[in-house]
Amino acid sequence: MLDKFFGKFSKDLGIDLGTKNTLVYVQDKGIVINEPTVVAVNMRTDEILAVGEEARKMVGKTPSHIQAIKPLVDGVISDFEVTEKMLKYFIDKAHEGGFGLSPRPRVIIGIPLDVTEVERKAVEDAAKSAGARKVYLVEESMAAAIGSRLPVTDATATMIVDIGGGTTEISVISLGGVVTYKSLRFAGNELDNNIIQYIREEFNILIGEQVAENIKIRIGSATPLKESMQMEVRGRDLINGLPRSIMINDSQIRETISRTLKQIIESIKLTLESTPPELVADIYEHGITLTGGGALLRGLDKEIAQETKIPVRIADDPLISLVKGTGILLSDQALLEKVLSQGTEEF
């Protein structure tokens, strides 16, 4: 009874708990938070110093007693306590300007398709400990498909490839459920690691994750560009320890990320091979939809289309498709009941 009372003063939330970024959708307000999934902790006092963007700025720049922690690895919780505190921070921030009572919202959270029961329970427990009244878990690919306005409840196949920071989810959806899928524990972060490794091996220069991500965004591509692009990269020379800069081009970056992209494309092909023939016919007709930050890599849609011989389109606003899907589910109880992840507590 008390929970229901507190619930009246809370706005229900949809959360995209990503490896790289966490987005929060508030019912009737839209997306109110889009911040990096990073928490800065003072290890001496166990105090949270910063969360989100402020904590991201500290990555690689902290003294020994302060750690900038990324509490999710490959889409799952690796540090329960820090995740709980981060969620509490985001839930409180989403309710700023409220009545001053402790918020007790219903929360919908996207989870990877192949999470274990232990990982599923960790997400539920972290959200409840952070103040959630009820927690509903929905597969990330399902939420992304709903956010992309795909016909997930129809008797027709929808194929969606969600390339996030830590995971790549390849799913065929029909009649409100996932028919076949492949879940890969690598995605955008792996591309960044490819770039770090390449620059280290080829030039003996060490760069950080943020620099690698910036390279990927600025000159990364899956297919050759009409006009070559290049940029200056600064890092630490591994031989003498001094700062050093080099020029790199799109061709070099394309070569170094090609192996990871081939693995993703091969997984798409394997998923198609295990899909019932009737649904494959639908996919050939309607195409494949790309979502997630990885969908924005130049030419990736063309490369996948060329390799699979199937039309490929990028979802509108691919970075926020998943959290938009949770927002739609917040206002559609019937649809939420249909797509709830197995093992999630029911209404």
Image: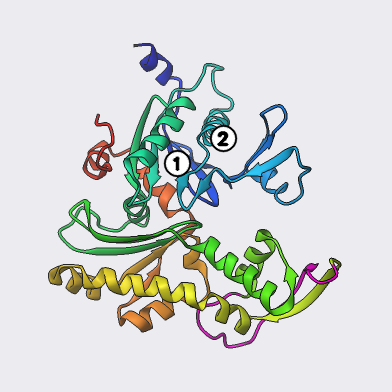
In the displayed structure, 161 sits above or below 74; it is: below
Q: Name the residue under label 1.
A: 15
Q: Furthest-top residue in view?
A: 2
Q: Which of marks 1 and 2 is nearer the N terminus?
A: 1
Given the image, on which type of amino acid does mark 2 rest?
Val
Given the image, on which type of amino acid does mark 1 rest?
Ile
Q: Which mark is residue 39?
A: none
Tell me the chief SS of the magenta region: loop
Q: Furthest-front residue in view?
A: 239
Q: Is residue 169 left or right of residue 247?
A: left
Q: Name the residue under label 2.
A: 82
| Label 2 Cα neighbours within 10 Å, binned few <14 / some 14-19 / many ≥20 | many
**C-alpha span from label 1 to label 2:** 16 Å
Q: In this view, does 294 lie to the left or right of 200?
A: left
Q: What stretch is highlighted in magenta?
A: 220-240
- Marks 1 and 2: CB-CB under 8 Å? no
Q: Residue at x 49, y 27 (%)?
A: 130
